[in-house]
Amino acid sequence: MARNPLADALGLPADDLAGLVAALRRRGESVATAESLTGGLVTAALTSVPGSSSVVRGGLVVYATGLKADLAGVDPSLLAEHGAVHPRVAEQLAEGARRACGATWGLGLTGVAGPDPQDGVEPGVVHVGVSSVRSTAVHTIGVDGNRHQVRSAAVRAVFDLLRAQFTG
């Protein structure tokens, strides 16, 4: 497999990333994202794989809290009550990405990369969601490290959760 500098920078084995895209292609499925703390890194990682255009529908970068509601359909009352960093926000981001882009799978990510807390949530807290028509799964991780390490871990976590849904 050819070297993939973006995958390397994110700590993703290039073969695993290419395998994820190939699995989606074999299954005849597509994927879309709604990303907050990763700012488009998930979509960038997916599209760094040659042939990914057959499976990647698109992505929403919803860094600002209001855009989570406006573009991805996150319930404004959820955002008002719990803030932007919450497991249900990741769930609704994933569902919103899937619906907005007409994809088989939606991936949603929210968290705090740091260095400062957000809405009372400490840096390193990350929630990732994966949505299909049948169900939505959410996973929360805690990451010790700098912004790059937190964001990279978030990308890896959402890909791991997506792979788990293939067999679940």
Image: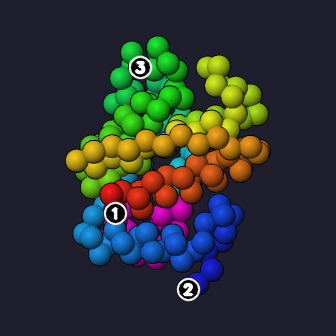
Q: According to the image, label 1 marks what residue?
A: 167
The magenta segment is 43-60
SS category of the residue bearing label 3? helix
Q: How crowded is mark 2: few (under 14 residues within 10 Å), some or many (20 or more)?
A: few
Q: Are marks 2 and 1 in contact (CB under 8 Å)?
A: no
Amino acid type, residue under disc 2 in the picture: Met
Where's residue 156, x and y in %?
A: 56, 57
The chosen color scheme is rainbow
Where's residue 27, x and y in %?
A: 27, 70
**In the rendered structure, which disc, 3 or 2, sits on the residue that comes first in sequence?**
2
Q: According to the image, label 2 marks what residue?
A: 1
Instruction: Kindly identify the residue that appears in the image at 28 percent across and 49 percent down.
Output: 132
Q: In which quarter of the image is residue 30?
A: bottom left
SS category of the residue bearing label 2? loop
Q: Residue 58 magenta-drawn? A: yes
Q: According to the image, label 3 marks what residue?
A: 78
- Left or right: residue 106 versus residue 19 is left
Instruction: Kindly identify the residue that appears in the image at 58 percent across and 49 percent down.
Output: 154
Which one is in front, 142 or 117? 142
Where's residue 95, x and y in %?
A: 32, 40
Which one is in front, 81 or 138? 138
Q: How crowded is mark 1: few (under 14 residues within 10 Å), some or many (20 or more)?
A: few
